[in-house]
Amino acid sequence: MFIRADFSRRAIVAPDQYHWVASPQSGVERVMLDRVGAEQARATSIVRYAPGSDFPAHRHPRGEEILVLSGTFSEDGADYPAGWYLRNPPGSSHRPSSADGAVIFVKLQQMQPQEQRAVRIDTRAASSWQRADGREVCPLFRDAVERTSLQRCAPGEALFDTVPDGAELLVLSGQVLLDGESHAQGSWIRLPAGEYPGIVAGARGATVYLKLGRLGDTADAA
């Protein structure tokens, strides 16, 4: 299965374009944002857990990255309300569930094989944020290939001050403008390497999940 699998092209999915697809597990649905592979795929998705739903324990050979967007996501007896960021390294396993329901942003099979550290960050905590380059930033992960963070941008502020090798963002609040077109909360945008002076925060500002780097480097299906 190939969904928005050409990483040399711009890809955008707006909230009104979400197409929810049932997963193999009852009560769990997903919006496939990009995907290379079948059920065990290199994939980026928004996943919705109905109350009381779960997945059996399973492994992630190339890792899993999660940002909880709403509700409470649980794994192996630990609860993570909206705002938590989880990073499970290659080879890790877990049993995910949600007692009350949850919506999460998920990236599968996209980590470097040598990554070993599990990450848990409460992005709601003031201590998780810092000032960097004139804006508030919540660092999530950084290595030689990618730089991932949450960023709060002021109205009209340009998202990039350098030319990115590639960029992926999910609008968490407010809106961003790309070449004059507005993209509201819930919009997912993936940009290939290049200059993007036309992408700025909207009139009310924006908070975004932002990943910078060579995003197609791990596009091989596992």
Image (cartoon, rainbow, N blue to C red):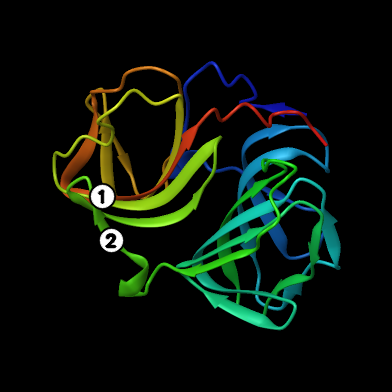
Tell me the quarter of the picture where residue 133 sits: top left
**Residue receiving disc 2:** 130
Tag 2: amino acid = Gln
Give whichever of 150, 25 is nearer the camera.
Answer: 150
Q: Looking at the rendered structure, which numbered label has been put on residue 206?
A: 1
Q: Is residue 52 above or below residue 170?
A: below
Q: Dot 2, how many residues are within 10 Å of its Cα: few (below 14), some (14-19), or many (20+)?
A: some
Give whichever of 122, 107 is nearer the camera.
Answer: 122
Q: Is residue 206 visible?
A: yes
N-term mark: 2 or 1: 2
Question: Residue at left 22%, top 25%?
Answer: 180
Query: Is residue 108 left or right of 142 when viewed as pictured?
Result: right
Query: Is residue 63 left or right of 144 when viewed as pictured?
Result: right
Q: Where residue 67 appears, x then y in whole percent?
A: 53, 59
Give me the C-alpha separation between circle 2 and circle 1.
16 Å
Question: Residue at left 38%, top 17%?
Answer: 194
Question: Residue at left 78%, top 39%?
Answer: 41
